[in-house]
Image (cartoon, rainbow, N blue to C red):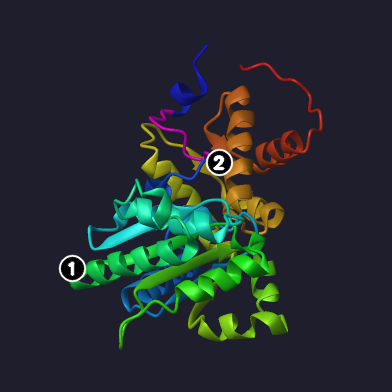
């Protein structure tokens, strides 16, 4: 019996849930989000914020951006938004090459002074220092205020550190609180990432198949693409999950034409609904 990959002629799995930047698809909204991200950083505007509901592809967007950056950017990627201010300063210093500091230099004030020196050096070398904070809706008041403080590090005409916040819509809501008004006013570049449109589903699927280097003809019918949109609401993460399960259903049927029935069975399996076991012809 052929394996799933061999049957469809895949060299890679096209609908993985793990974001791989080479599978990044330039939907209208994702292209706009990428433009906002680049603009905010390269124009040196201090804060850039990208928000969207879970599954819209914020992490994929970020990984694609990171895969394309040059040596003119020094990036610190923070995965845990609850990182204390001192730990954030240490992470920034470490990414700038300062991995070992004497005990007497570990107060927040000393760390900030050292960071400012390194930021000025990077500025003279025409390099931009960037902090990327994923899942930023988890930042508490103290952490957000700490970021606002870092944004005060500047020359007469240039912010020395660029701060990128990526998070769910709750982040935007949190910034509307009165206590965070000053920070909210500093975020000059912001974009809300939208799901795929109906007319983007079929091109998205074809793009994923093409990148996976399919050696044989695999077809999602227009009806199956419409059903995928209806179920997934255009969320790329859910589109991928449904497509993968629909193809498994087609694999069992020994067909490379993915039908609405395959999509429905794929959706059922995602939801833990038992479907009739069928043998491959």
Residue 148, relative to residue 240: is it above or below? below
Using a 10 Å C-alpha cutoff, classify the residue at mark 2 as few (fewer than 14 neighbours), some (14 to 19) or many (20 or more): some
Residue name at image x 39 percent, y 35 percent: 214
Disc 2 to disc 1, how far (Cα)? 39 Å
Left/right of residue 199 with respect to residue 272 in the rendered view: left
Can you give x and y, in whole percent of width and height, for residue 22 in the image? 37, 47
Can you give x and y, in whole percent of width and height, for residue 209 in the image? 43, 42
Residue 50, relative to residue 57: is it above or below? below
Of the pair 70 and 161, the residue shown nearer to us: 161
Residue picked out by circle 2: 17
Q: Secondary structure at mark 2?
A: loop
Can you give x and y, in whole percent of width and height, for residue 99 in the image? 34, 47
Residue 202 seen from this side: no
Q: Is residue 253 magenta?
A: no
Can you give x and y, in whole percent of width and height, for residue 255 in the image? 55, 29
Residue 209 seen from this side: yes
Point out the frontmost of discs 2 and 1.
1
Part of the protein shown in magenta: 9-16
Name the outermost residue toward the front: 104
Residue name at image x 29 percent, y 62 percent: 73
Disc nearer the start of the sequence (2/1): 2
* Circle number at residue 125: 1
Residue 54, relative to residue 220: is it above or below? below
Of the pair 44 and 84, the residue shown nearer to us: 84
Left/right of residue 160 with respect to residue 188 in the rendered view: left
Q: Secondary structure at mark 1?
A: loop
Displayed quadrant of residue 197: bottom right
State whether the magenta stretch is mostly helix, strand or loop: loop
Displayed quadrant of residue 248: top right
């Amino acid at each position: 019996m052929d394996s799933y990959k061999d049957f469809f002629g895949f060299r890679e799995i096209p609908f993985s849930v793990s974001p791989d930047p080479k599978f990044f698809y330039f939907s209208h909204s994702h292209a706009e989000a990428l433009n906002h991200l680049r603009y905010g950083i390269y124009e040196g505007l201090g804060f850039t914020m990208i928000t969207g509901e879970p599954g819209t592809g914020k992490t994929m967007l970020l990984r694609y951006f990171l895969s394309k950056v040059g040596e003119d950017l020094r990036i610190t990627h923070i995965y845990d938004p609850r990182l204390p201010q001192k730990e954030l300063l240490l992470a920034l210093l470490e990414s700038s090459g300062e991995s070992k500091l004497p005990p007497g230099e570990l107060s927040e004030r000393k760390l900030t002074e050292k960071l400012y020196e390194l930021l000025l050096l990077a500025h003279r070398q025409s390099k931009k220092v960037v902090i990327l904070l994923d899942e930023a809706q988890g930042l508490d008041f103290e952490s957000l205020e700490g970021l606002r403080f870092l944004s005060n590090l500047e020359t007469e005409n240039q912010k020395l550190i660029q701060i990128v916040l990526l998070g769910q819509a709750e982040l935007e809501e949190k910034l509307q609180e009165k206590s965070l008004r000053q920070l909210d006013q500093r975020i000059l570049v912001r974009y809300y990432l939208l799901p795929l449109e109906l007319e983007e589903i079929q091109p998205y699927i074809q793009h994923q198949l093409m990148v996976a280097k399919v050696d044989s003809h695999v077809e999602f019918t227009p009806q199956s693409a419409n059903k995928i949109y209806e179920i997934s609401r255009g969320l790329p993460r859910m589109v991928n999950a449904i497509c993968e399960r629909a193809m498994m259903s087609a694999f069992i049927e020994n067909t490379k034409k993915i039908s609405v029935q395959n999509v429905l069975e794929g959706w059922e399996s995602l939801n833990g609904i038992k479907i009739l076991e069928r043998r491959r012809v």
